[in-house]
Amino acid sequence: MRVRERPSRGRLAVEAIATAIAILLLAPCAGAQQDPVARAMRDELARTVSQLRLAGMEKPYFVAYRVDEIQQVKVSASLGDLTVSHPTRVRQLKVELRVGDYALDNSNYLAPRTFAGGMSRMVSGVGEAPLDDNYAEIRRQLWLATDAEYKKAIEDLSGKRALLQNRKRTEDLPDFSKEGPIKLEQPRSLVAVDVPALEGLARELSADFKDMPELLTSSVEIEAQDSYTRYLNSEGTWFTRSEPVVQLVIRAQTQAASGLPLAETIHLWDKSLSDLPSREQLTAEIRALRTRLDRLRQAPSMESYNGPVLFEEQGAAEIFAQVFAPGVVGMRSPMSDDPRFEMFFSQFMGQIGGGSFQDKIGGRVLPDFLNVVDNPKLDEYGGARLLGSYTVDDDGVPTRETRLVQKGILKTLLTTRTPIKNVSQSSGSRRGWGPAPSNLIVSSEKGSSDQELRQELLRRARERGLEYGIVVRRMGGGSLEALLQTAAVVTRQAAPSTSLLEVYKVYADGHEELLQGMQFSDLTGAMFKDIVAVGDKPVVYTDQFVPKMGTLFSIGFGAAGMELPAVSYVVPSLLFDDVTLTKVTGPFPAPPVSKSPLQEASK
């Protein structure tokens, strides 16, 4: 419910002028004027700017409305049988509202009541809009979400001000940066989907696992999604954006004789179904997956290894994505009424969210022959599609190329409109819950051939008195799976369930021995300074980017989309001087007591 105080005549005049200015600033492009959804957003925002105010309380100084229309088809099959076929279409609306001013507002603050109020309070600015273009109902839903966010904002600002009266701010940073308004409309590009054909493909591909009875589980998932975003804020920014994406995920899991779970995932991304590999290529991928898992089940293990490690091809991109990339985003840790909670929160998020390089700006994070650039304006690299491309971020800030590391020195971080130490303006990198890379490209001034890297690996191994070096070609899983496993260990819910997929002993005569059940011990972003050589043929690898967990509380759950953004990495092979690997230890679940029915049926 809105509560309004009775204004004086003078203030009526001021508000009338403010309303007129707001309407002029918020006038969208011509196409939006005929769109009932855009019109509802514009009209309700103008009313909110001019009228929303609790008696004796401050008005919002910033309001943003976002409506995401998502059309999605998801199918899944196992061993030739369809398990999921789920077409959906939803409209989600999200409200971001700030009270106070750019210097100090209700953000970057976490009150205990946030959790006490449950999920309804934590996502108060999120709602569903009708799929029909019902102007009045869309406005009503925006009104309800805005009202809830406003009440939460003034409570949070009051608590934050009371907290600061008893505690000195450690950093005199504004809570929100000022950015110029933009107007940008992208045409909508729908993913054409033939659902029966998609179901048939999932059935056919999953049936290829029928003659693999040694597998415990297997599945094929295909998801085609189109997200169309409308965004409008009180500063005058208006944009529409269309983001089609198609994912194909092939999973298989088995166990070694020791009970060690062995799982592999093939994750393919693109912007249309026609761009995915052919049926024959996908069948070949599945056969190769089976061969790798069969070899891995029979492979030996070893207790530990300390020495040089060469990450080749996809393995290099995976280790860069999971360990180094989270450090190039900058965000603030939220303040809290309870210092103990702040300490616990900081420690816990540091453990499961990866280390940040926020205090390393101006310092060395890589060897002096490496550079890192984030470039959302690139669509491809070397003929391979880059999936991290976009033109405007979720704050309405235009994207741009950002040189993050130059000759090994960290120059800046990827940020949102929440300023951090040494970075006062947004880099146009807000994607979903917080800052995220787009297309991260690692380049070198002295790349080495594959043969030269192998020779250098073995030379350094010999200096350690080792007969072999270690090569990692695939880590397996992905950033999200790695985070979930780490979180399970930190919270003592489970032990790691999987290990590195392709780890080899490599000897001087060129032969290799596959190892089973190996994991890294304390591999951090700081160790990337110890890279001694890189390859000259980078690979393109796409993965979901897991944001810093603290972003959920400093910016808010509902402020933007909740999908994990896709990031493409261009990374050459990486040779580290010193890495520790250890054997994965149990307890592991015991293998099935009896044979699979598929094995019995095949006799």
Image (tube, grey):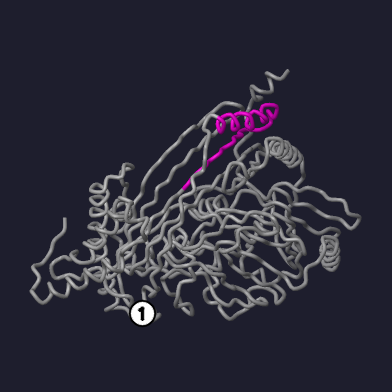
- Residue that protrudes farthest toward the right in the picture: 509
Q: Position of residue 348 (x, y in %)?
A: 47, 61
- Residue 585 in the magenta stretch? The answer is no
Q: Tell which of 74 and 166 is nearer to you.
A: 74
Count of numbered tags = 1
Please indicate, yes or no, whether residue 119 appears anywhere in the rendered image. Answer: no
Q: Position of residue 253 (x, y in %)?
A: 63, 38
- Residue that protrudes farthest toward the front in the picture: 30
Residue 98 appears in which quarter of the rendering? bottom left
Question: Which residue is painted at 69% across and 30% down in the image?
Answer: 212
In the displayed structure image, the side of residue 426 where residue 483 appears, left or right? right
| Local secondary structure at mark 1 | loop
Q: Tell which of 39 and 410 is nearer to you.
A: 39
Question: Which residue is painted at 51% across and 54% down in the image?
Answer: 487
The quadrant the N terminus occupies is bottom left
Please indicate, yes or no, whether residue 386 appears anywhere in the rendered image. Answer: yes
Which three-letter amino acid code belongs to the residue tagged 1?
A: Arg
In the displayed structure image, the side of residue 187 where residue 470 appears, left or right? right
Specify the segment rendered in magenta.
197-226
Q: Position of residue 346 (x, y in %)?
A: 45, 66
Q: Which residue is mark 1?
A: 169
The quadrant the C terminus occupies is top right
- Residue 212 in the magenta stretch? The answer is yes
In the displayed structure image, the side of residue 342 where residue 594 appears, left or right? right
Q: Tell which of 351 and 68 is nearer to you.
A: 68
Q: Tell which of 68 and 570 is nearer to you.
A: 68
Q: Is residue 420 above or below residue 76?
A: below
Q: Position of residue 48 (x, y in %)?
A: 22, 62
Q: Is residue 116 above or below residue 282?
A: below
Question: Which residue is painted at 36% across and 46% down in the image?
Answer: 91
